[in-house]
Image (spheres, grey):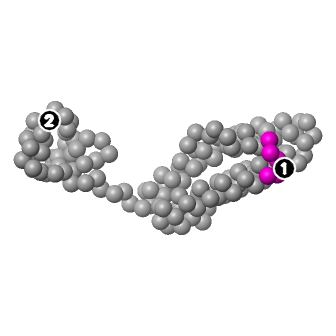
Amino acid sequence: MNYRLTQGWPQHIESGAFVDPDTNPAYLAWLEEGNTPEPVEAPAPALLIDAKKQAVRAVREQVLDRLAGIAGRASRRGEAALAEACDTAAGALLDITKDLPDTPGAVEAVLFARYQAIALTAIGAAPSLATAFAQVDA
């Protein structure tokens, strides 16, 4: 009888059943015998990269919504420079996940650097855009 750790409860390898690690007598007895569950299987790099992309896209959508609101108000007020800064930042955000490296750690570093560069460039062009990038849920 062997078990493997998962993101949730341990899994009995032979049956595929998940067990409550606190109350399952067979699992607790197995541990008492000095056994150790197999470690969590590492997800494939492609899955990790996709997860990072999805997380960035969720943040991006929040910022794009804010930029669209700011750009709309700027256009109505005749503030062409502010509206243009919003459009430039939005365009860069839409391209943030393009041409990424193929290792998860490198992807995370590149995405972080790109996001920081976009935010700093936008805020440099129009300091009021700091609100578009502030307090975004990650």
Task: Please rate how many residues cluster around mark 1, counting C-alpha atoms within 10 Å: few if below 14, some from 14 to 19, many from 20.
Answer: some
Q: Quadrant of the image for the C terminus?
A: top right
Q: Are the two marked residues, 2 and 1, in contact with CB atoms closer than 8 angstroms? A: no
Q: Which residue is mark 2?
A: 24
Relative placement, left or right, of 107 versus 130 is left
Q: Which portion, as a residue range, is magenta?
A: 124-128
Estimate the x, y position of residue 73 in percent, counting from the top left.
84, 36
Question: Distance of mark 2 from mark 1, alpha carbons?
Answer: 61 Å
Q: Earlier in the sequence, mark 2 or mark 1?
A: 2
Q: Amino acid at mark 2?
A: Asn
Task: Report the residue at 17% width, 46% height from top.
Answer: 12
Residue 70 in view, yes or no:
yes
Residue 87 in view, yes or no:
no
Task: Report the residue at 44% width, 56% height from top.
Answer: 48
Task: Report the residue at 63% width, 38% height from top.
Answer: 135
Q: Which residue is mark 1?
A: 84
Estimate the x, y position of residue 5 in percent, counting from the top left.
25, 48
Relative placement, left or right, of 27 versus 70 is left
Estimate the x, y position of residue 133 in percent, counting from the top left.
68, 43
Estimate the x, y position of residue 70 in percent, counting from the top left.
79, 39
